[in-house]
């Protein structure tokens, strides 16, 4: 059924927003893909449930599913049914440059749409609205963010969270020592091994790591939460043809109800490889973004 819906959406794009490639001048990503016969998707290794590797080391997740629909739309647009799809791993530090320099055509992960990033790359409509949260071990003495004063905390290098924690530390004069993990898995490991008292990241990512831990009860999320930036698929800057196709693909999924079905599948049902359930219903903020698709950043 989902495949049929994907085909219907791709067909609608082919007949509507996307005119046949031979009747329209192509530029940017679509021109590159047309000439090479390849589209390259950037993915994360451990951003559960958005973009991560399963037990066969294949990229899976909510963001990956959205990008599969984009690929179908590209196939229809360019009349390339046998389009080759390549997956390229990215980290928080490498994702922007790899999109900007053309190595990756679209990044399907957990990237926040921020005004500062728009000088380098472009963003699709919002597909998730997170909040910053702290995760810590249940057996330590940290009950709230105030208890982190003077302690060592973890952030992931190259993230908007790292910028926020530095700002929080400086403005609040908290005296925290900040360790940087090269990716989310390493940041969680810093907490898991006791080298850091807590790790701040978006709620969905932290919930995923806790659910996937060997013993989830060993970890807790602090009640403190802070506004974060909306997630979007990342593309090259000023690539209006490709952005239009990506945005209309997402909007079509939202109109059809398929977006909500995919959300339920990845956020409220057991997911591979360990059949964990994130148990995170769609927030009111995301419901508004689905009802009125937009690409507005928060900061």
Image (tube, grey):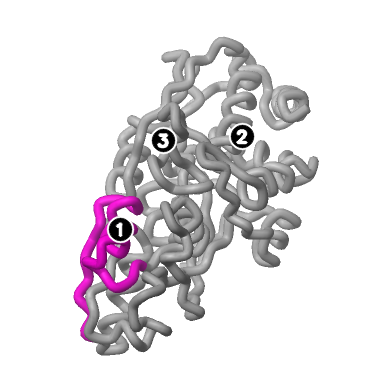
Q: Secondary structure at mark 3?
A: strand
Image quadrant where residue 68 sits: top right
Quarter placement of the N terminus: top right
229 vs 27: above or below: below
Q: Residues within 10 Å of mark 2 (few under 14, many from 20)?
A: many
N-terminal-most mark, 2 or 1: 1
Q: Which residues are magenta?
A: 175-199
Residue at which label 1 appears: 187
Q: Residue at x 37, y 63 (%)?
A: 160
Q: Is residue 195 shown in magenta?
A: yes
Q: Residues within 10 Å of mark 3 (few under 14, many from 20)?
A: many
Q: Residue at x 48, y 15 (%)?
A: 84
Which element is circle 1 on? helix
Sequence order check, earlier mark of 3 and 1: 3
Q: Residue at x 54, y 34 (%)?
A: 242
Where is 198 relative to 81, above or below? Answer: below
Q: Give how far across and how far down residue 234 sits, in percent.
A: 46, 44
Residue 155 point in image, percent of width and height: 30, 64
Q: Work out how far the residue at label 2 is from the one at label 1, CA to CA, in angstroms.
A: 35 Å
Residue tagged 2: 245
In this view, the mark in front (2 or 1): 1
Report the disc number at residue 70: none
Q: Is residue 218 left or right of residue 76?
A: left
Q: For the residues marked 3 and 2, what is the alpha-carbon distance in whole angstroms?
A: 18 Å
């Amino acid at each position: 059924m989902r495949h049929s819906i994907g085909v219907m959406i791709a067909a609608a794009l082919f007949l509507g927003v996307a005119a046949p490639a031979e009747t329209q001048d192509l530029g940017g990503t679509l021109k590159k893909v047309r000439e090479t016969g390849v589209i390259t998707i950037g993915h994360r290794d451990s951003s559960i449930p958005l973009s991560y590797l399963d037990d066969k080391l294949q990229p899976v997740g909510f963001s990956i599913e959205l990008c599969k629909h984009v690929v179908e739309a590209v196939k229809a647009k360019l009349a390339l049914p046998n389009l080759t799809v390549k997956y390229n791993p990215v980290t928080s530090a490498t994702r922007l440059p790899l999109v900007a320099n053309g190595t990756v055509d679209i990044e399907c992960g957990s990237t926040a749409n921020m005004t500062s990033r728009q000088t380098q790359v472009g963003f699709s409509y919002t597909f998730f609205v997170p909040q910053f949260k702290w995760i810590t071990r249940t057996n330590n003495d940290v009950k709230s963010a105030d208890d982190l004063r003077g302690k060592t905390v973890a952030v992931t290098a190259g993230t908007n969270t790292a910028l926020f924690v530095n700002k929080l530390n400086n403005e609040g004069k908290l005296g925290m020592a900040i360790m940087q993990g090269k990716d989310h898995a390493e940041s969680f490991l810093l907490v898991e091994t006791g080298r850091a008292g807590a790790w701040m990241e978006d709620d969905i990512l932290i919930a995923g790591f806790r659910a996937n831990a060997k013993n989830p009860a060993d970890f807790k999320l602090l009640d403190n939460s802070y506004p974060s930036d909306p997630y979007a698929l990342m593309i090259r800057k000023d690539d209006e043809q490709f952005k239009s196709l990506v945005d209309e693909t997402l909007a079509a999924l939202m109109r059809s109800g398929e977006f909500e079905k995919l959300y339920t599948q990845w956020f409220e049902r057991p997911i591979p490889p360990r059949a964990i359930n994130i148990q995170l219903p769609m927030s009111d903020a995301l419901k508004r973004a689905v009802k009125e698709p937009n690409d507005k950043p928060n900061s």
